[in-house]
Amino acid sequence: MNRRQQNEGFVCESCGARVEPLTNGSYRNHCPFCLYSKHVDEQPGDRRSRCHGLMRPVGLVYKRKKGYQLVHQCLKCGVVKVNKVAVDTVQPDELARWAATLAWSDALNKARPVRGRS
């Protein structure tokens, strides 16, 4: 697969948004709106995975040389992968909205009583 084919736009299978190719010289592998990805690689860029499950964003990490990276977990096979955050491009990642959703979800989970505990 050539570089142009790897950086094609797509329709997000999670939220249905039209996702444009990156314009910053990198590859797009997740939706900039809901941040979901698809399990298509075994190694970065190889497109050899047979799983093809949706990958849910589960975290954010920072690495000095690569910057911020999204942590994704496959909903089908459970594998965890990291992907660089898309910045300086036509559709940058909407991390603020995702972080707010994650914080709200975390707050709800902490507020729920756990069965069997008093």
Image (tube, grey):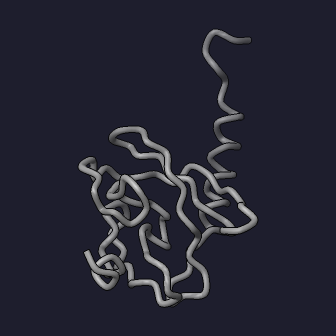
Q: Quadrant of the N terminus?
A: bottom left
Q: Is residue 58 above or below residue 113?
A: below
Q: Residue at x 70, y 43 (%)?
A: 107
Looking at the picture, tell me which residue is in the foreground, 100 or 39.
39
30 vs 82, left or right, is: left
Give residue 96's position: percent from left, percent from top: 66, 69
Q: Quadrant of residue 110?
A: top right
Q: Which of the 4 quarters of the picture holds residue 22?
A: bottom left
- Compared with 28, 75 (above or below) is above
The quadrant the C terminus occupies is top right
- The residue closer to the viewer here, 35 or 39, is 39
Give the left or right position of residue 113, taking residue 47 as reference: right
Q: Residue at x 34, y 63 (%)?
A: 46
**Hey, which quadrant is residue 30 in on the image?**
bottom left
**Horizontal and vertical percent position of residue 59:** 62, 51
Is residue 18 depicted above or below 77 in this figure? below
Kindly identify the residue that appears in the image at 64 percent across and 20 percent down. Answer: 114
Give how far across and how far down residue 102 sits, in percent: 63, 52
Closer-to-camera residue (42/82): 42
Which of 85 and 34 lies nearest the eye of the viewer? 85
Q: Height in image: 25 above or below 116?
A: below
- Residue at left offset 27%, top offset 56%: 48
